[in-house]
Image (tube, rainbow, N blue to C red):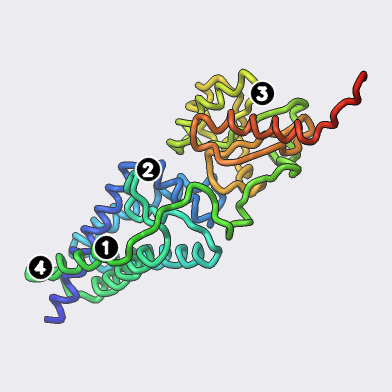
Amino acid sequence: MGAIVLGAAGPALVTVLTAAAVGKLRDPRGFARAVAGYRLMPFRLAGTVARTVIVAEVAMALLLVLPWTRRVGAVCSGALFLGLLAAQVSVLRRGLRVDCGCFGRPGRTTLVGPVSLARAGAMLVLSAMAAFAPGMPVSGLPLAAGYLVVVAGLGLVLRPGPVPTSPSAGTAAARGPRAGDRFVLTGRVAAQGETTLFALVAPTCGTCMDALPGFVKAAGRVRVVVVTSFGETAALARSGLPVIVDPDVFDANGVPWPPYAVLVDASGTVLTSGRADSPGRPAALLREAGAVLASTTPTPPAGA
């Protein structure tokens, strides 16, 4: 009986790892954004880490299927889920509210919290069981289905909350530049000699690409420069806007995640900044900057 209980963990793990990989492959850009949201690495590495995780999940599922590599796959999956648990605990300790990215479901997110922690913990337990199992007996398949029901049921018992579209109050370290700050680009203050709207985007970010037309439209009113931390600039260059690659731009300016816009004056001082997750946001930022300048510009004396 013990062999069946332990052996049933293998098929359950294979199913979960396969479903997770398939979900992430449906929206790899969204998964990369979720990885970046954890803020455990420079933003430029998020895409690479996301691809590595997807490949690892597929590889572990294959290792678990083969009898002579089953234990290796179980140990590797245990390490993966242990790392996921540690990352999520770190997110909660820092007060961040981000999508866990666990199953990469486009349009459906699970906030890092009780649901994601319980699921990762359950998968860690299944990995340990699979590592000690003598095999994966066919008679254990009904029990494996029971394990899957338990893991899936966690999402029904612990309902996730919505992922906010802006950083929470607890993320002061990633609040982005404020009016009066100096915007840093490639290690120095970004003084362009004229008012400039910087569009901070990533080519792997679908929302960023959707927001680009708004920046192109804003270029009719102000100088617009696209800034990315990745070297893949071909898709961005097709917008017709100048593109600058700065691997440290997000971390240097405390920008939470793209797309983000920063409007600076000729000296590189920030006039206003904020999320740019819709085509209309660049124009809204320009209106905000106009209001700020109008409120700070002295009224000329009568007759002057």
Residue to which mark 1 is pinned? 156
Residue holding disc 3? 223
The residue labelled by disc 2 is: 28
Q: Is residue 140 above or below residue 44?
A: below
Q: Are marks 2 and 3 in contact (CB under 8 Å)?
A: no
Tags 1 and 3 touching, CB below 8 Å: no
Helix, strand or loop status at disc 4: helix
Using the numbered discs, state the Cα–Cα distance from disc 4 to disc 3 in whole angstroms. Answer: 63 Å
Q: Which residue corresponds to the image point at 53% horizontal and 24% vertical from the top-left? A: 237
Amino acid on which disc 2 is placed = Pro
Q: CA distance from mark 2 to mark 3?
A: 32 Å
Q: Which mark is residue 142?
A: 4
In space, the residues marked 2 and 4 are separated at their CA atoms by 32 Å
Nearer the observer: mark 2 or 1; the answer is 1
Residue in front for this viewpoint, 167 or 69: 167
Quick one: label 1 or label 3, which is nearer the N terminus? 1
Q: Earlier in the sequence, mark 4 or mark 1?
A: 4
The quarter of the image holding the N terminus is bottom left
Expressed as whole percent of the image width and height from the top left, the position of residue 211 reads 49, 31
Numbered circle sitting on residue 104: none
Q: Amino acid at mark 3?
A: Arg
Please name which of the two marks, 4 or 1, marks the residue nearer to the observer. Answer: 1
- Specify which label sits upstream in the sequence, 2 or 1: 2
Which of the pair 84/301 is nearer the observer?
301
Identity, as a three-letter code, of the amino acid under mark 1: Leu
Q: Give the CA distance from mark 4 to mark 1.
A: 21 Å
Label located before the other in sequence (2 or 3): 2
Which of the marked residues, 4 or 3, is nearer the chain's N terminus? 4
Q: Amino acid at mark 4?
A: Pro
- The percent position of residue 70, horizontal first and vertical second, equals 23, 65
Residue depicted at x 61% and y 24%: 242
